[in-house]
Image (cartoon, rainbow, N blue to C red):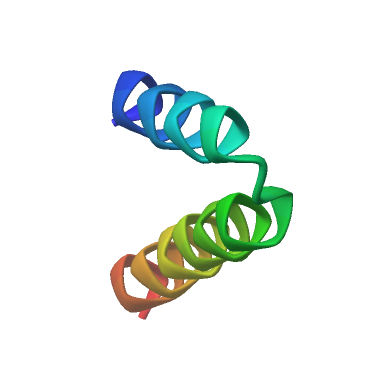
Amino acid sequence: MPDEIVRLRNAFRRRGKRIPALVIFLGFLLLAVVYRLYFWI
């Protein structure tokens, strides 16, 4: 999972768009939090 995030970030940095990479990073972070909450309950 972390390797895929790094690849996506690098790909977006090459294009010169940092905002989409940041959105994807936040999306993965939010997904991880939701995943933890589901397992917590």
Q: Residue at x 58, y 50 (%)?
A: 21
Q: Residue at x 46, y 23 (%)?
A: 6
Task: Establish if 20 lies above or below 14.
Answer: below
27 to the left or right of 1: right
- Residue 14 position, x and y percent, is 55, 28
Image quadrant where one finds the C terminus: bottom left
- Residue 12 position, x and y percent, is 52, 40
- Residue 16 position, x and y percent, is 66, 41
Quarter occupied by residue 28: bottom left
35 to the left or right of 25: left
Image quadrant where one finds the N terminus: top left
Q: Nearer the viewer, residue 16 or 3?
A: 16
Quarter occupied by residue 19: bottom right
33 to the left or right of 8: right
Task: Establish if 33 lies above or below 1.
Answer: below
Quarter occupied by residue 30: bottom right
Q: Residue at x 54, y 39 (%)?
A: 15
Q: Nearer the viewer, residue 18 or 22?
A: 18
Q: How many marks?
A: 0
